[in-house]
Image (cartoon, helix red, strand yellow):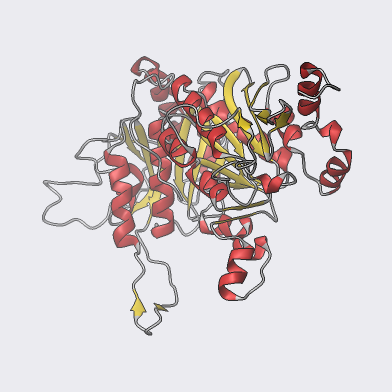
Amino acid sequence: MKDSAHPNDQLAAAKRSTTDAARPDIVTKISASGKMTARQRMAALLDPGSEVEFGSIAAAKQDGEWIPEAGGVDFIGAIDGQPVIASSTDYTDHGGGYGAGRLGRLFAVAYERRWPVVLFVDGGGSRAQHPRSGLGHIETSGQIGRFSFLDGLPELSGWVPTIAIVSGPAFAGHASLAGFSDFLISTPGSSIGMGGPPMVEAALGQRLSPNDLAGAEMHELGGGIDLLVESEQAAINAAKEYLRFYGQRHTTAVAPTEIDLDRLEGNYDVCLVIDSIIDRNSWFELRPNFAPNVATALTRINGKPVGLMANRLDKTIDEHAAVKIGRFVELCNTYEYPLVALVDTPGCSTRPRQKKKDAANTPLEVPGITRWHTRVLLAHQQRTVPLISIQLGQNGGIAGTLMTGVSSTRGVPLMKLAWPSVTMGQRDGFSAVVDHNAFDDVIQPNETSNRVRRLLALLGADGLDRPSRAAKKHWIDTW
């Protein structure tokens, strides 16, 4: 140890060097861009006074001088009193690329304690080893526990909620973390891709900005992110709201909006039907601009979390809508959210597209609804949470089944209701044996809310108040 400094003084100085107060120029620059520093993100995310930092010191020199960690910050803390693992890369510090060992360690803690994970991931990729390797430094942080950087988050899929926030360029390992998460939030101007601009330029000779290459706006339309919000603070608010569905299984029940649905039957607005069923101000839609012909949202009914799906716009189910439905069913099933499906669809469709060709000018086939509809049925087949379906209008072909599962097998709807105006479909010689239009009851539209809310109120005894099982049901499909 240097004679000029007491060991404790030098350790304190090393830790101070990682704070925002130690780098005012960088903080000013980040604030001018409308963004937060890594530590400001953590302060806005976590309950005040709950933060426990991990890994602020990375190594020691041969003479004993302490070396602070670089590239980001990691914490255990709480959100609304619920323990969480929270991490943020720091793009201004080594490009946000900090060693993978710390995250693997925290993923192990999340798995063992069953704590949700919230990650800010903007950077050019993780570092396979510390940049100080080979300098004779003694490492103080590294691989501890059962997981590495890349297998930890996939193992958490379907076991605890995993949230990624991308508000800058996220490439390589950072993009992998974003893609493995079951809830992905981004902000305008950010980007998510496996190969960054330098790699693309080296390979193709083309210089592109991160957003031109893999912009969040493109991912929003293609289903690559759950929400595109206007700022980092809005992303933090969305992450907290998402976690409330998991952590706050009981809130005060709020009466739905009173709407005379009988007056609207035959020319209804599905948004009004939804408002008449759910607790007011509880609608939290996922991927609203991807496959908008079907709405998928977390919401509350009687103060309890529920997943709700509804056909809208042209109401057909194409491959994008099928993918959206299937993953939403997986999400709700693994976190024990009962499902409500509002069905009104004329049938399945394929999306018009230009035919692609490979280098030899041979047409390439693109999988369409004929492949993706089976994935939805598999998601329903493994579903164990109850589903209530209400057919509001049409149910063409197999499209309605994609919303509810096959009624003659596992996962049969808990109750299958219909409005008087439903289209029953074409009768054939088999309908006396297998009738996919069968309902438990036909009700007036104004009865819908009462039926759904009363039935869901009876489910508390089924162990649906919190996922307490000893093993996860399944992982959640990536995007």
* Residue 448 in view, yes or no: yes
- Residue 221 image position (x, y, % from top left): 56, 58
Of the pair 180 and 345, the residue shown nearer to us: 180
- Residue 317 image position (x, y, % from top left): 39, 57
Examine the image and state in which quarter residue 195 appears.
bottom right
Q: Is 325 left or right of 131, judged from the image as shown? A: left
**Who's the residue at 36% across and 46% down the image?**
403
Name the quadrant of the N terminus. Answer: top right
141 in relation to 321, above or below: above
- Residue 62 image position (x, y, % from top left): 68, 30
**Who's the residue at 56% across and 42% down the image?**
129
- Residue 99 image position (x, y, % from top left): 59, 39
The residue most toward the bottom is 361
Of the pair 424 and 319, the residue shown nearer to us: 319
The residue most toward the top is 461
* Residue 260 in view, yes or no: no
Give the mark count.
Answer: 0
Q: Is 171 left or right of 233, judged from the image as shown? A: left
383 in relation to 76, above or below: below
Of the pair 346 and 331, the residue shown nearer to us: 331
Examine the image and state in which quarter residue 476 appears.
top left
